[in-house]
Image (cartoon, coloured by chain):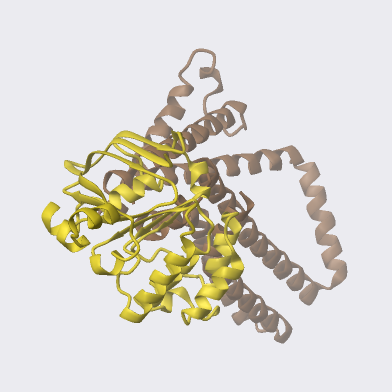
Chain colours: A yellow, B brown
């Protein structure tokens, strides 16, 4: 098992954002993390990415407790813009190259150019859509073992969504694992293998979409409506 | 660590450039007034320079704390926490880059002041007077009983006092951003915490000299090793508590 979460719980004051969530992720799969806004998707992702510690429970990455070294194999992309204001597009590539050994600078340039991002553009002047493209390019230019993408399609126009989905599919090579949080079910249905449903911080179900389709013929939206 | 320092320095590049460019403009204006013999302008520039130097001295001293606060307040903190680096490296890099920033800015100010004095002496009294001034200063220095070790002690004192201030700032910011992360009063809380922690440490310092065997070494103008030990130990403790809190509690 690549990642094991055992009774993962996160409190923010008196609010339980994630509640005793036990969830395992296999290597080489693409997971869709689905749930309403405020259901605990982002908090779960931050814990698994090592950005915040659980209040209770344990996270095992490849059999050992998650530690900061593991971040060299985990590529996390937050839903909010997070690059430093002083950066230009090329500086983002340099930053990732400086800190992540698995970063492919050539691929980053290729992706940013394909998405219309010029290397001299200032990050603080980018539109939200352009910023989202930059985040995805920086994240996918890494050859990580685990990609955690928090709402990668948020704020992105339809054409660019297609480009991003293509990039994700192109990066998923069967050896790496993707967890993609989204509420755009139709957009991810074609390539997500497992759907993880979260409601009010609790794991509702984990469904193998292919076998579910074979068994019942239900679409992801149908399953979502039934479970949630 | 070097790469972390590189990006911390980039965060402080804006203020550094403003300070250094202003300094260069000031030096040029001073030189012009020196050459033209405009004493009124010269006096004005010196007065303005002294005021600016005081402001820069304080701002540069605590800039790293302000940068940490900005990092933790915004989602830019992901840029640090997503890295495969320990919290000790991240905080250590912040401390060292603060030191480097101060070395650059204060170094530039020292050069500017030295240039100003040398320029004025040469302009009004000639090279011979400059040589005389250096000789007189050296003699006064030696006769007055001032020793190089005094300067070393002074430097050590300044360094450890400043280090402790920075560590108090780091802890105050991390505590406030941990406890009141969602509150718009987190900035105010960090300021209050800064003074509270400083007050507690001051009380600890006074209490240390009440201990048997140390009471005879009570605070005096003489340099004493117990001061250094106290500041170093509390500085390290503050660093450890900051790192522990950031590692265990910090959430963005």
Q: Residue at x 28, y 43 (%)?
A: B179
Quarter where residue A169 is shown: bottom left
Q: Residue at x 35, y 49 (%)?
A: A46
Examine the rendering and report whether any part of residue B198 can be seen.
no
Quarter where residue B20 is shown: bottom right
Residue A80, x across and y down, in percent: 34, 64
Is B134 in front, or is B99? B99
Quarter where residue B241 is shown: top left
Is B208 in front, or is B85? B85
Q: Which residue is outermost to the front?
A: A214
Is A191 in front, or is B16? A191
Residue B209, x across and y down, in percent: 49, 22
Q: Which residue is outermost to the top?
A: B212
In this rendering, position of residue A189 left or right of residue A111: left
For residue B128, above or below residue B142: below
Residue A37, x across and y down, in percent: 19, 59
In this rendering, position of residue A84 left or right of residue A58: right
Q: Residue at x 53, y 46 (%)?
A: B85
């Amino acid at each position: 098992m690549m990642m094991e979460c055992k009774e993962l719980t996160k409190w923010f004051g008196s609010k339980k954002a994630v509640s005793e969530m036990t969830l395992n992720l296999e290597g080489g799969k693409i997971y869709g993390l689905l749930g309403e806004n405020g259901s605990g998707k982002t908090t779960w992702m931050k814990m698994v990415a090592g950005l915040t510690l659980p209040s209770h429970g344990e996270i095992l990455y490849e059999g050992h407790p998650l530690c900061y070294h593991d971040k060299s194999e985990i590529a996390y992309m937050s839903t909010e813009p997070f690059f430093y204001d002083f950066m230009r597009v090329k500086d983002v590539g340099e930053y990732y190259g400086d800190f992540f050994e698995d970063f492919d600078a050539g691929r980053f340039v290729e992706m940013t150019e394909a998405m219309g991002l010029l290397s001299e553009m200032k990050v603080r002047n980018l539109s939200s859509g352009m910023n989202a493209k930059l985040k995805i390019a920086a994240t996918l230019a890494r050859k990580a073992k685990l990609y955690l993408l928090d709402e990668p399609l948020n704020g992105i126009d339809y054409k660019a969504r297609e480009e991003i989905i293509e990039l994700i599919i192109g990066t998923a090579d069967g050896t790496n694992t993707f967890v993609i949080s989204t509420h755009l079910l139709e957009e991810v249905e074609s390539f997500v293998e497992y759907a993880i449903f979260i409601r009010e911080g609790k794991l509702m179900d984990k469904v193998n979409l292919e076998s579910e389709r074979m068994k019942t013929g239900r679409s992801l939206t149908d399953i979502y409506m039934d479970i949630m | 660590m070097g790469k972390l320092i590189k990006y911390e320095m980039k965060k402080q590049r804006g203020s550094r450039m403003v300070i250094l460019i202003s300094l260069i403009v000031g030096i040029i204006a001073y030189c012009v007034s020196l050459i033209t013999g405009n004493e009124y302008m010269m006096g004005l520039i010196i007065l303005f320079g002294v005021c600016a130097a005081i402001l820069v001295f304080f701002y540069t001293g605590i800039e790293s704390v302000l940068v940490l606060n900005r990092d933790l307040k915004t989602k830019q903190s992901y840029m640090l926490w997503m890295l495969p680096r320990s919290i000790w490296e991240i905080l250590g890099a912040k401390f060292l880059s603060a030191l480097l920033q101060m070395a650059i800015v204060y170094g530039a100010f020292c050069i500017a002041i030295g240039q100003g004095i040398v320029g004025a002496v040469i302009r009004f009294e000639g090279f011979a007077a400059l040589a005389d001034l250096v000789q007189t200063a050296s003699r006064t220095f030696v006769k007055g009983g001032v020793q190089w070790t005094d300067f070393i002690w002074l430097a050590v004192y300044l360094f450890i006092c400043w280090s402790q201030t920075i560590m108090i700032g780091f802890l105050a910011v991390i505590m406030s951003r941990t406890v009141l992360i969602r509150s718009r009063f987190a900035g105010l809380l960090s300021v209050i915490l800064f003074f509270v922690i400083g007050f507690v440490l001051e009380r600890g310092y006074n209490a240390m000299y009440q201990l048997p065997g140390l009471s005879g070494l009570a605070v005096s103008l003489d340099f004493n090793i117990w001061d250094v030990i106290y500041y170093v130990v509390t500085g390290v403790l503050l660093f450890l508590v900051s790192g522990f809190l950031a590692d265990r509690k910090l959430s963005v």
